[in-house]
Image (cartoon, helix red, strand yellow):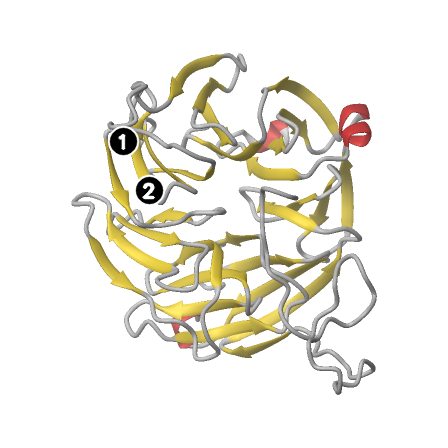
Amino acid sequence: MSGMLVTPKPRGVLSRSSTQLITPDPIVDAQESIPEPSTEGELHLEKEIDCGEEVMSCRFNPSGSLLAVGLITGTIKVYSVPDGKWVHTLRDAQSVAERLPVTALRFHPTRPASKGDLLLATYAGGQVKFWHISTQSCVRSLREERQILTSTFTPSGGHFLTAGSSDEILVYNTDTMTCVNICQPSPSLSVMDGHRSRIFGLTFHPFSEEHFVSGGWDDTVQFWDIRQKHSLRRISGPHVCGDALDIDPDTQQILIGSWRKEENLQIWDSQTGQKMQTVPDDYRGPSRVYGCRWLGAGHMIAAGSDINMCRIIDRNSLLTQGSLVDLPGGVYSLDVSSPGPPLAPLLAVTSSHRLFLLRPTGSAFS
């Protein structure tokens, strides 16, 4: 994943390319056991699944019954959520031959259940594939001449977007797979009406078919209309390196995660473009954020690297309420399935080759 995700290895963990313990202190016993992942506070670990290879992306289907995980070798595994069983494998001759990471997964949000789930998958080699889950078949595909690092659907699923290693965001008609617009910056470098580097985050306003935001390496979050060539406005500061943009449908606030040690989780007002709050670090120290989400009306979830942890944060106190710690590597992806009351949301968190299914506990989610 050179040039895509850069995660420093923490002290005292196993290297992915070696079975030797990495430590600068020669007196540390190499046979000393490494802590297993565990939860603290108001978070319950329901299932842990070994996916066999490093997981780069994950997504629940709209009903919450299935979870798709994209692997570093280009294979997609689909698991049954109730029992954790591996039920489908999505790959074809192209993905097997190229063995490039699955960078983003998105289920069609409004497809009738009678037609079966349709999954949009993007790959580091530039492939865009639509997979029909129940038949394990690729029903539509195209290829872009760049690394694709992120994608998203409009709320209705009528259009989808892709972005990645260029400064362009491509807008496609979902039914025809034709590109209907290219959102990009003006030629003049003095006008910042688009991105100037890699793009890792895309999300639509929950109630709009036209308006979305994007974030990337150029330390900006851009506001767009899919019918326009250039961005409408921007906020400066966040360094987005993953699926770390989420708009609250009730308050219009944007939760933004940055892959940096300071000010790595912030809340911004999407209407005024003003920063409202910076969420303090966990007591264990700073964590560079790859992914974050709003979690109901009163909480948020964030995860990343350095400390290699995932935490649930109270929206009022901004304190950690529950956490998954001692993970084997950085958290590159997470997702939330919300069945609605009386059940609490189900969370999917990935680290190295492992998948963790968790559920918040406590009075706030009962």
Mark 2 — residue?
220
Name the quarter where the N terminus is drawn. Answer: top right
Whole-Å distance between the Cαs marked 1 and 2? 9 Å
Q: Where is residue 178 in the image (x, y as percent from the top left)?
A: 51, 12
Q: Do the residues labelled 1 and 2 touch (CB within 8 Å)?
A: yes
- Front residue of 262/140: it is 262
- Front residue of 116/24: it is 24
Q: What is the three-letter code of the residue carrying label 1?
A: Met
Left or right, residue 179 beside residue 57 = left
Query: What kind of element bears circle 1?
Result: loop
Whether residue 358 is visible to the viewer of this picture, yes or no, is: yes
Left or right, residue 52 beside residue 261 = right
Q: What is the three-letter code of the residue carrying label 2?
A: Thr
Q: Position of residue 274 (x, y in %)?
A: 19, 51
Q: Residues within 10 Å of mark 2 (few under 14, many from 20)?
A: many
Determine whether 135 is above or below 19 in the image: above
Of callouts 1 and 2, the N-terminal one: 1
Which quadrant holds residue 68?
A: top right
- Front residue of 87/202: it is 202
Determine whether 25 is above or below 47 in the image: below
Which quadrant holds residue 196?
A: top left
Whether residue 158 is visible to the viewer of this picture, yes or no, is: no
Mark 1 — residue?
192
For the point 47% across and 19% down, the residue is: 172
Left or right, residue 60 beside residue 244 = right
Name the quarter where the C terminus is drawn. Answer: bottom left
Left or right, residue 224 beside residue 55 = left
For the point 81% across and 69% down, the residue is: 20
